[in-house]
Amino acid sequence: METVSVDTIYPESDSTNVTVGDLLDSNSSITAVRSGGVGQQTSVFTRGTNSNHTLFMINGSSITDHSTTNGLFDAGIDPVPYSTSIDVYKGSQSTLFGPGAIGGAVNINTATAVTDKAEIGYGSNNWQSISVDKSLSNDGGLYSLRVNQDQSDGYSVVAGGDPDGYEFQSINFDSEHYLKNGILQSTIVYRDAHTELDGAGIDDTDYTSDSKFYFYQLRYQGDGFNFVIDRNQHDREYNNTGELDTYDSQTNHVRFSINQSVNSLDITAGADMSQYSAQFENRGSYNSSVDKSAENLAGFVNWDWIGDSFIINGGVRRDWNSLHTPVSTYRLGTGYIISDDVTLIAGTNTGFKAPTLYEMYGADNFGYTGNPNLREETAQTYEIGVVTDSRDKWSHFSSRSVFFITEINDQITYDNSTYTNDSSGTSMIQGWDFNSTYHVDQTKIKTGVMYVIAQDSSNNQMTRRPNLTANIGVDHYVTSDTKLWYNWQYHGDHRDIHPSTYQVVDREYQHHTDIGFDHLINENAVVSGVISNVTDLTYERPYGYSQPGREISIRFKYFF
């Protein structure tokens, strides 16, 4: 058992979401703020930390877009059909995953398809979707191909404005080859997202983006030895009335490790190396650019020990970067097994976020110049909690309740036409994170609650982070072939930024309800339907960006 707080989400079991950001918003530990409809920029706040403090990965490898100005990963343009599951790691996790994991990490898992299927969908705003999964096996291994296209006319964030549509295409190839002493796996992901954009409270009829992403990975797991080699590329273009802005990022990555078990102690030691670069050019009245590359080398050791009543997890890591000073991180967690049903956990994890290439070396025509002397943002998370897992012949209840504190030092802020480290104090994020699943007879109830106080070094409440978030999900099988489900999400009172004056303002709570069904027509066919925002609530999230009203969709899935 790991003492690290982690949730696993299965996209296949969720019929309401198109992108990773929308799917993550169903987890109460995360606030995913989407600037309008599907396809618009989506910022992810994990346990109250900043929107650029969550590291995104595929199969354990970072997919950071180094051409972004502040390192934010846009979770609004990454469709989920190619993913088999998504792991959400909470708290500072750089010892496990490297730079960027100050607030947490999101790992998108892929695997070879086990069934062949085709799916079509249609819904409100002319939403249309089609996907095909095809698998093949022979003496050489397993192979699968997933192809998906998803599009919609969308709607406008401004009343009476021009609708903002999107079109996503994704292709995913996975393979597995069983060798004498291990397994060799490969993954290829291609994604193209074309979206129409608006500004906050502004209807822009000819502003579009085209974001392409490429990921190639080869990984080997053997008896005592593992390695991963991969490459990812981000290729983004923004066109506004003929003004073309381009953003490109490339990362080459290699990781290898050696595993050794001694009695009850498992030790993993290895090295992690990456070379990354970014080039972007903003044109027009606002002109900015960067063209830079860097290398990062890390060594790490992690260990796990399991006794009769105690569990201890730990690790250390050291990162050397060609552009800034070395950084050391560590983690230490322990669990005490009180009974078969209850385990107490406690621990501390550290993390850091390196300055982006733009923050260090960028420039624009309004006087901004980068600061090559920026230090890394560093964080430490403390946790204490209880994990339960009890079952009998009629029911099963599991839960994780955790009190946490995350302290962030040297946060990077913008001031006087450059970026600087805030050395005046510590940003403090503290709260309580709870989630549970109760399964009885033909009904499953999932509950998530997080209460968080997020304050900067001046003790000001940070924006777009509600004190209270919650979700309740209910799945009920009416018959063995028909499931009805209900999901309610709540985002409490919070502070936001006014779209015109840019002043910090107070916002009231927001919530919405989705319902749906899944029906097994026969052993080869499933039909499902969804009504999102059932009560047709009108709300803006964030301020100035209207969210969709009631939407209805239906999907048909056929296994062949």
Image (cartoon, rainbow, N blue to C red):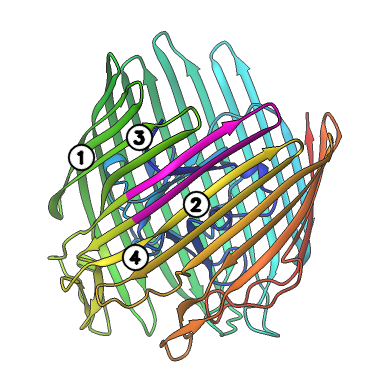
Residue annotated with mark 3: 335
Q: Are marks 3 and 4 in contact (CB under 8 Å)?
A: no
Dot 4 crowding, Cα within 10 Å, few <14, some 14–19, many 20+: many
Mark number displayed over residue 434: 2
> Label 1 belongs to which residue?
317
Q: Secondary structure at mark 1?
A: strand
Q: Earlier in the sequence, mark 2 or mark 4?
A: 4
Q: At numbered mark 4, what does the secondary structure look like: helix, strand or loop?
A: strand
Residue placed at 48% from the left, 44% from the top?
A: 400
| Amino acid type, label 3 | Gly
Image quarter (top left, top right, bottom left or bottom right) of the N terminus: top left
Which one is in front, 471 or 44? 471
**Distance in Å between CA atoms under marks 4 and 1:** 31 Å
Nearer-the-camera pick, 460 or 67: 460
Q: Position of residue 546 (x, y in %)?
A: 62, 77
Q: Is residue 306 visible?
A: yes
Mark 1 neighbour density, 10 Å: few (under 14) some (14–19) many (20 or more): many
Say few, some or many: other residues with alpha carbon within 10 Å of mark 2 (under 14 / 14 to 19 / 20 or more): many
- On screen, 421 above or below 379? below
Magenta stretch: includes residue 280: no
| Amino acid at the residue labelled 4 | Phe
Q: Amino acid at mark 2?
A: Phe
- Magenta-tinted stretch: 383-404
For mark 4, what is the residue? 280
